[in-house]
Image: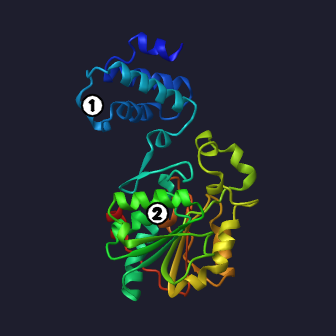
Amino acid sequence: MSDERHIDDGAYRTVREALRAATAHLEAAGVPDAAVDARYLVAHALGVERAALLRAPEHMLDDDVRRGLVGLLARRAAREPVSRIIGERAFHGLTLALNADTLDPRPDTETLVNVALALAADIHVHSGPLKILDLGTGTGAIVLALLAALPDAEATATDISTSALDMARRNAERHGLAGRIRFVQSRWLDDVDGRYQLIVSNPPYIPSAEIAGLAAEVAQWDPRRALDGGPDGLDAYRAILAEARRALEPDGLAVFEVGHDQAARVAALAINHGLVPAPLDWPLLRDLGGNTRCVAAATSGRNWKINLGIAAQGG
């Protein structure tokens, strides 16, 4: 059935009918969470918030909206992620724009933000307002979530892609955080100066040979540079950890997102480069699936003090 027949058969006349038909269309295409995606796309076609759909289920869709919705559904059925279709993603209480040169921020990465926030109060007591370094910032998701929760912190964010840096800068301006962050084009720590109390990074960690087997929403739409961690997935960690001590204050801390089975190996790399990892069995380090998703490592054998309250406030 063509797009025009979808319009002509009246399946998308009202909000209620559009939600039902859009869900059925995406389910038939094998799209996971079809009902959720349908709500996003119907709302986007109408130019309203999703909550507005519930308030006006009998609202009539005009022909332009219906045609636009059919086009959006075709893109999602082809496995283009909803976030890329609508051009933004919600992350840790922020709405972030993204483009083809940025990774699509995902809920697992909020684990890293929560770990950093839970440890931030202890760093603040010892060192004062935080200076944060975000390596491979992409949309700016991690560093902007931290700045939003830590009003006296300042940050430097790096990326090798100028397009990604432009997007992160736009997101910083959108949320009123641009005055506390500077952006530097750099491959990891190559062009970074100064010292920081906190380094954060979600580097590429997928082994090269495994990328083709990822979900189409990832393999076809996220930039390969943001996914490909080399033969064993650890190339970026090696590059960062080799230089981390010179960029960290004497009582500094680094927090990394890692692949679901990489925590022990990344912690071992940290030890090899003179850092002291936190216990890997901390529940704090685990994602929603129970995987150890983060490695935290310090320049000294600090007494790890956790403030869960600030992480909860930040979320």
Identify whether 279 is placed above or below 165: below
Q: Quadrant of the N terminus?
A: top right
| Three-letter code for the amino acid on which mark 2 is drawn | Ile
Determine whether the residue tagged by mark 1 lies in a helix, strand or loop. Answer: helix
Callout 1 crowding tier (Cα within 10 Å): few <14, some 14–19, many ≥20 = few
Mark 1 — residue? 54
- Which percent across, then down, holds residue 314? 35, 64
The answer to whether residue 98 is above or below residue 250 is above
**Left or right for 31, reference 54:** right
Which mark's residue is nearer the viewer, 2 or 1?
A: 2
Name the residue located 44 percent from the left edge and 34 percent from the top edge.
37
Query: Where is residue 104 shown, x and y percent of the image?
Result: 52, 50
Label drawn at residue 233: none
Give 285 or 235, whichever is nearer the viewer.
Answer: 235
| CB atoms of marks 2 and 1 within 8 Å | no
Where is mark 2, residue-wise? 142
SS state under label 2: helix
**Which residue is drawn at the image coordinates 36% and 18% (left, top)?**
63
| 267 or 196, nearer to the observer | 196
Label 2: how many residues lie within 10 Å, few (<14), some (14-19) or many (20+)?
A: many
